[in-house]
Image (tube, rainbow, N blue to C red):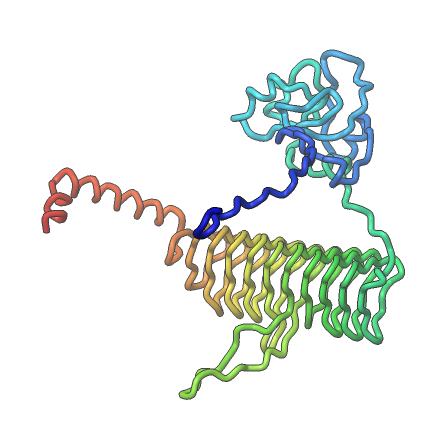
Amino acid sequence: MPTGPLPPRRPQRPPSIKVRFMTVTPDNIPGDPRFFVTQGPFGLADLARCSGAELRAAKEGDGTGRFTGIAPLQSATRAQVSFLDNRRYLPLLEGTGAGAVIVAPAFADKVPAHAAALVSRAPYQAWARIATLFYPAPPVTPGIHPSAVIGAGCEIDPTAAIGAFAVLGERVRVGAGVDIGTHASIGAGVEIGARCRIGAHVAISHALLGERVTLLPGARIGQDGFGFAVTPEGFENVPQLGRVILEDGVEIGANSTVDRGSIRDTVIGAGSRLDNLVQIGHNARLGRCCIVVSQAGISGSTELGDFVTVAAQAGLIGHIKIGAKARIGAQCGVMSDVDAGADVIGSPAMPFREFFRNVAFLRRMARKTTQDGGGEKADRA
């Protein structure tokens, strides 16, 4: 009989489970019916009318084909519409199998003989309209899920949808055609205008939303601003008594945050677009149709004019003004006012031309130092 410790037992593997997955390639993904509502088919006249493009019939065929969707140039079939707006992809246009292609006037003569041309001076806009025609936003299914919690005094339009485990505080007003996703939290007194879409796990408080506002999952609207008094003993919070106003057509990306004002409102102007992971400080005011790209931050009480663009990871200090149609470059550090129409980059921010002149100068100096042996002397030192 063996003595001593027994050898360790080999762990038994759990029984294998065979799961069958569909094999897909990236070019076969657009409009997957498992995820997207599809309309159609549509004829060429429908596509031209929807997009506002000029229809130029194919040199081959009778032009009576019907179209079922959109696809990239390299994978589109005769029943699909494709798009070109960049000269570098002309080789793909020459070999495309698409039955119709949206192009700018400069590329209209490059469309293959078998394909119709939808010629537009704004081809990307035409592409957006046709894509929306085939793949509209999912329809709202009215009703309140049994697991939702609805506070006293709420006014909910009968055409609105309230998802599972959503929580609405007292006196919330929800307009026609609103879609509130699962686990959303809507604070007391919040007003949501018609046809807004509130994603899963969104939290809203102290806010008034206009019509057609979209909040993607995880967005946080109306929480306390970053305000406190510094005392010898530490910090003392300053009450944040303002609101957040999201005007019509605003879209805010996933996990972005908009703080409510301290003594006046934080305002996001009509049609503005905030990317994912954007921070807007208290009392900030954005004009109409501003763009703020991912990981950018705008500090409290800063004001942006209409059509301002703030690129990724840019940071704006508080209490400054950015003029209309100004463009703030990626990773830019803005510490003073920016004139209307200006383009700035760098940290501290400076005009584009000045920034790149400085970069070129530093490169020349680095090369000169290396050629003169300065780099070797520095290394020896």
**Does the rendering let one see residue 307?**
no
Q: Horizontal and vertical percent for residue 267?
A: 63, 66
**Residue 356 image-quadrant placement:** top left
Q: Kindly identify the residue that appears in the image at 70 percent across and 18 percent down.
A: 115
Above/below status of 335 relative to 92: below
**Residue 50 image-quadrant placement:** top right
Q: Residue furthest right?
A: 158
Q: Horizontal and vertical percent for residue 147?
A: 81, 63
Q: Horizontal and vertical percent for residue 100?
A: 71, 23
Q: Kindly identify the residue that appears in the image at 55 percent across and 54 percent down.
A: 292
**Is 268 placed left or right of 47 in the picture?**
left
Q: Residue furthest top?
A: 60
- Between residues 22 and 208, which one lies in front from this camera angle? 22
**Is 350 placed left or right of 220 in the picture?**
left
Above/below status of 350 relative to 24: below
**Is 153 placed left or right of 113 in the picture?**
right
